[in-house]
Image: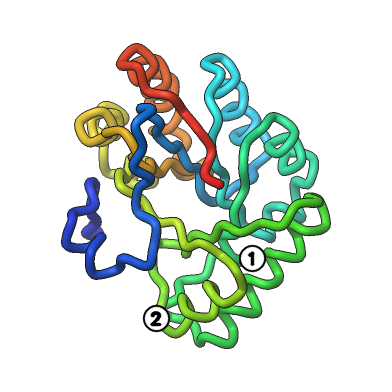
Amino acid sequence: MSFYWIKTNSLIKKIFSKYTWDIPNTENKIYLTFDDGPMSEITEWVLNQLKKHNAKATFFCIGNNIEKYPNVFTKVISEGHSVGNHTFNHLNGLKTSTEEYLENANLCKASISNLQAATCNLFRPPYGKIKASQAKKVKQLGYKIIMWDVLSADFDISISPEKCLENVLNNVKSGSIIVFHDSVKAFPNLEYTLPKTLKILTKRGFVFDVIR
């Protein structure tokens, strides 16, 4: 099983301070994010869950999936959510040359631009893995690199849906950026966790906002 942080610690945030790990605020806002979509039925299910709670979120989209499901992508935008670049083919930056990585990110940018009039300025590296040289170039293109404060680990098929929910509820605070995935692999955990996350955190007084 791969090692990963559920709660990003302060040392990591300090070392990689040029990335956005959370968004401190005094309004009890938190930021749900969904990686790896859009997917036809799954992303639409997520949108329906968000709508039930008047919640907004940010979707970090794979360009190849945008090409496959353009109608789902435009629905994300039309319902008031924000979108970000997650490369065209979900590349692991540590295993990819900087040149290839930037080309792939630009392909995703083109897919987004074809369907969204406004400029997309949010970028999340797949797996959270990116070389310093790649990050520098991405920032030069005008992107904010958005990481996370809380990882649901919904992608991990070795953990239970209950553990996935616990990962979120035990670690969230005002300003947290929380990662979910609108993907086939994550859906068994997501289907259980997301409705309960929205219901419980709404009762706790949190407000779900987009990243801009």
Across and down, in percent, residue 150 comes to 30, 43
Between 93 and 78, the residue placed more toward the observer is 78
Q: Along the polypeptide, which appears first: circle 2 or circle 1? A: 1
Residue drawn at the location 54% of the way across and 61% of the way down: 123
Which image quarter: residue 102?
A: bottom right
Horizontal side of residue 14 vs 138, given as left or right: left
* Quadrant placement of the N terminus: bottom left
Residue occupying the point 57% across, 45% down:
59
Please state if 65 lies on the left or on the right of 57 as rendered.
right
Q: Residue at x 56, y 51 (%)?
A: 60
The amino acid on which the numbered mark 2 sits, given as a three-letter code, is Ala
Task: State the SS at label 2.
Answer: helix
Q: Position of residue 197 (x, y in %)?
A: 37, 23
Q: Amino acid at mark 1?
A: Phe
Q: Residues within 10 Å of mark 1 (few under 14, many from 20)?
A: many
Which residue carries the number 1 mark?
88
Q: Which residue is mark 2?
A: 132
| Camera sees residue 184 | no
Which image quadrant for residue 196?
top left
Residue 109 seen in this snapshot: yes
